Amino acid sequence: MQPIILLGVAVAAVALVGTGFLNSDSWNQFELWVQQLGWGENMLMSPISHAFVDLEVKKILNDNDTPQNPADDYFDNVIQSCSFHADKDIEAPPAPVAAGPTTPGLAVTVINEGVIICKMLNDQQQAIAEGKVSIVDIEGYTSSEKEYVPIVQCITETGLVEDANCLDVQTPIHYVKLVVENALWEEEVLPPTGP
């Protein structure tokens, strides 16, 4: 019985060291395989299939609701955002171009802005915090760049909190889910305005 336990401990140690846990600068990265997410009758198609996710921790001053007494101030560590980087570009709709006297223009109708959502889940896979950014707002994503998704909604003991610094680092996070949806748009070439 003892050799099986020792073998199990050795396999666990090799797995932790082999994946870089506490052995490199990237020990806090989560490697995710992005899954398709069923949404009603439609199936969202993710523009990426693989991504790395980091959690950005920030310390913020807590004045203990007594701004007149700085002696009782302390710092809270919060998860401010999750960042991800992937190996594929995510396109945003092109900017419209006005037609000139001799050059055609381009009309763009955005059907869906596209979105990147980062969710923190508890051990029952229930969302406890999330943030999102629009593909249109960030003007698309270029592969291997880091994109930060601010965590702005949290479920706490008092209910839903919408605040940029709501997720305490001591909150047990068991899963990180990344949802990436393509932007959709239509393009129409406009004829030149001249004779």
Image: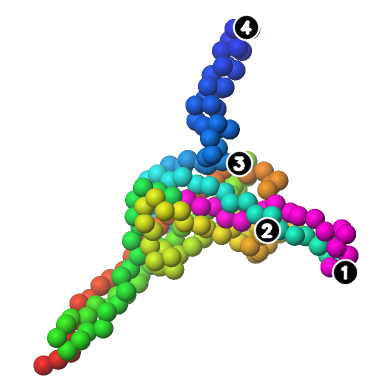
Which residue position is annotated with label 4? 1
Q: Nearer the viewer, residue 75 or 53?
A: 75
Magenta span = 67-84
User: Relative to 139, does residue 146 appear above or below in the rendering?
Assistant: above
Tell me if label 2 and label 1 are in contact, CB under 8 Å: no
Residue 13 rendering spot, x and y as whole percentages? 57, 22
Secondary element type, mark 2: loop
**Label annotation for residue 166:** 2
Residue 147 rendering spot, x and y as whole percentages? 47, 56
How many residues crowd mark 2 within 10 Å: few (<14), some (14–19), many (20+)?
A: many
- Residue 43 visible in the displayed image: no
Residue 60 rendering spot, x and y as whole percentages? 71, 58
Residue at position x 74%, y 54% in the image: 76
Secondary element type, mark 3: loop
Quadrant where the N terminus is found in the figure: top right
Residue at position x 56%, y 41% in the image: 28
Q: Amino acid at mark 2?
A: Cys
How far apart are the two marked residues, 3 and 4, measured between alpha carbons? 31 Å
Q: Is residue 187 left or right of residue 18?
A: left
Secondary element type, mark 4: loop
Which residue position is annotated with label 1? 68
Which residue position is annotated with label 3? 174
Magenta part, dominant SS:
strand
Mark 1 or 4, closer to the camera: 1
Farthest residue to the bottom: give it. Answer: 195
How many residues crowd mark 1 within 10 Å: few (<14), some (14–19), many (20+)?
A: few
Residue 186 rendering spot, x and y as whole percentages? 28, 71
Among numbered discs 3 and 1, the one appearing first in the sequence:
1
Among numbered discs 1 and 4, the one appearing first in the sequence:
4
Tell me if label 3 and label 4 are in contact, CB under 8 Å: no
Q: Amino acid at mark 4?
A: Met
Q: Amino acid at mark 1?
A: Gln
